[in-house]
């Protein structure tokens, strides 16, 4: 038969030994597994994955490269045709030029003129 030892009734007196004062370290709170599970997780915003733009052989531009001289020549010819459409009746050549500019810019934007 096994008998357990009873704790002794004698108490030992422990005297603390003097130590040099330690530097106070910054208090670091280490979460325990239970506290970490109970603590709310910090909201971390993940940026949505950006899809790569499709690679094309030709870059898309607002206007194809047309020189100033070419554009001026196109407008000059178009202004002639605007005046011809109205039968060369007396009118305002500035209005003819403005209408020709609009037509040429529309054609340049749509890709009809290119180098």
Image (spheres, helix red, strand yellow):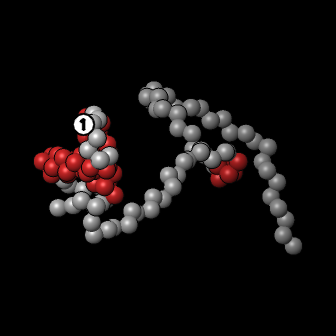
Is the C terminus in the top left, top right, bottom left or bottom right quadrant? bottom left
- Asked whether the viewer can see residue 101, the reply is no
Is the N terminus in the top left, top right, bottom left or bottom right quadrant? bottom right
Label 1 Cα neighbours within 10 Å, binned few <14 / some 14-19 / many ≥20: few
The residue depicted at 78 percent of the width and 48 percent of the height is 8
**According to the image, label 1 marks what residue?**
93
Q: Is residue 3 above or below residue 62?
A: below
Secondary structure of residue under mark 1: helix
Residue 42 pos. (x, y %): 59, 44
Q: Is residue 57 left or right of residue 77?
A: right
The quadrant where residue 101 appears: top left
In the image, 92 versus 46, the foreground residue is 92
In the image, 69 versus 1, the foreground residue is 69
- Asked whether the viewer can see residue 25, the reply is yes
Pick out the residue farthest to the left. 69
Residue 77 pos. (x, y %): 19, 51
Q: How many numbered discs sit on the rendered protein? A: 1
The quadrant where residue 94 appears: top left
Q: Is residue 87 left or right of residue 30?
A: left
The residue depicted at 59 percent of the width and 32 percent of the height is 15
The residue depicted at 62 percent of the width and 35 percent of the height is 14
Pick out the residue farthest to the right. 1
């Amino acid at each position: 038969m096994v008998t357990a030892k009873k704790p002794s009734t004698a108490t030992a007196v422990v005297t603390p030994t003097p130590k040099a004062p330690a530097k106070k370290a910054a208090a670091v709170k280490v979460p325990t597994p239970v506290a970490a599970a109970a603590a709310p997780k910090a909201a971390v915003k993940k940026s949505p994955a950006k899809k790569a733009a499709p690679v094309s052989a030709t870059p898309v531009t607002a206007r194809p490269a047309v020189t100033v001289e070419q554009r001026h020549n196109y407008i000059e010819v178009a202004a002639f045709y605007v005046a011809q459409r109205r039968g060369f009746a007396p009118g305002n050549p500035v209005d003819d030029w403005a209408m020709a500019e609009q037509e040429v810019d529309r054609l340049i934007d749509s890709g009809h003129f290119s180098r």
